[in-house]
Image: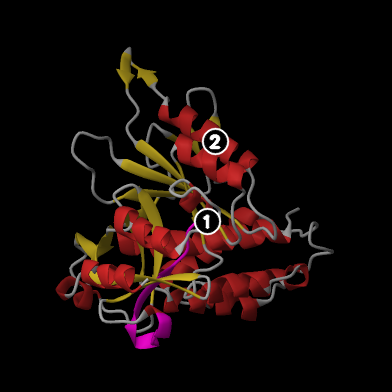
Amino acid sequence: MATIYAIRGLLLEEILLNLLSASGYLIVEYDSNDITLKTRSSGVLEVKGRGSNHQIDAIASFSISPPFSYPVRLLLEAKFYNEKVGIDIVRNAVGVLKDVSEFWAVVNNKIFKPRYHYQYAIFTSSSFTKQAQEYAFAQDIYLIKLENNQYFYPVIEALRNLSYTDFSGEDDKNIEIDLSGLRKNIRASLREDGNQGIFNYCRRYNFDREKLSDIINLNSELHNSYLGVLGNIFPIFLTASRDFDIEYLIDNPTIRICWNNNKWYIVKNNAECSHLNERDIIFSFDLPLDLFKLYADNKMLSKNRALDLKQEFMNSIQIVFKDRRNRIISSLELKLDNDWLREMREHI
C-alpha cells in the first residue's frame, strides 16, 4: 500500500533526476559491481553505510570528478506535502549521509576507502520549517524549494491534481501499487522522451494514463533546468524560460536578479524588475525564506538590506551545463549588474 503523497514525491524525484542530466548528472540505477551499492532481490537499490544499508531511490553521479576528491554522488529526496517539511526529515538525511560517508570494506585483507563524496539534497513542493532550514544549513544538507518557482509550477500543479482515484485506490492513504514498478516505468518514459511505456503500464493496472502522460509531456517542456550555485556556497534549482538560449548567456553573462510577486527571477541586464517582460526573463527559481534570516536581523528585509544581500551573496551565480550536441560539461559564471545595483541604491 502507498499514499498519494508518496506517489507524488516519487514522480517529483524522477522528474528532477531527469532534469539534472542537463547539469551533468547521471542516474545510478544498478550496482554494476560497485562495492558501495547493493541490489535487493526486489530490485531496490541500497547504498551501503558503516552501520547499515540505506534504500535510496534517487541517486545521481556527477560526470566530472573534482581534483583531490572522490567522485561526487548525489542522494536526492523529494517531498510532496501540503505542510512544511520538518526537521525530522533533515535529521534522517543527516544520519544517512554520515553513515554512507563512513562506509569502508575489507576485501582479501585490503581496506577499501569510501569511493564517493556524498551530497544530500531535499527538494520540496512546499517549504521547510525554520528548524529544518537552520539544522540543514549547519549539517550540509541542501534544501531546495519549488513552490514559488514560476516555470516549474506547472509540474507541481499537475502532481497536486493527481488523486487516489487515478490509481484505483480506496482513499489518499490506501493505494495498492508497486512503487518500484511505477518508478521503473516513469524513469524509462522520461528517458525515452515518450509516453508509450507509461500508457502500457497504466492500461495493465487500470491507472489514469492521461494524467501521467501529461506529466511526462510537461517534463519534456522543461528540458532546460540547471543547478546553479549562489555565492559559491548555496545551490539553487534554475528553471529556464521558454525562449532560453544558453548561447545568449555565454555572450551576455551580466544579469539582474528580480523579486517580483513573491517569486525570484534571473533576467537580462537591461530588464526592469518593476515591469518584467516575459522576453527578459532567463530563469525562475525559489529559495527557503529563512536563508535570508541568516543574513538579516529582522524577518522582513528592508529595501536597502535586500540590495546588500544581492550584492554580497548573489554577486555571482555559477551554472554547470551539458552541451546537448557535443555532450561536453561546461561552466558559466553569471555576474550581477553592479551599475544597476548602484543606481537602485541611489534611487532608494
Residue 93 screen position, x and y as percent: 54, 38
**Residue range highlighted in magenta:** 274-289
Residue 19 screen position, x and y as percent: 41, 65
Residue 40 seen from this side: no
Residue located 54% across and 64% down the image: 185
**Which numbered marker is on residue 289?**
1
Horizontally, residue 253 falls left or right of residue 164, namely left
Residue 257 screen position, x and y as percent: 35, 69
- Residue furthest to the top in view is 109
Along the polypeptide, which appears first: circle 1 or circle 2? 2
Horizontally, residue 82 falls left or right of residue 304, namely right
Q: Amino acid at mark 1?
A: Leu
- Displayed quadrant of residue 186: bottom right
Q: Amino acid at mark 2?
A: His
Q: Is residue 94 above or below residue 256?
A: above
Does the segment drawn in magenta span residue 71? Answer: no
Residue placed under numbered mark 2 in the picture: 54
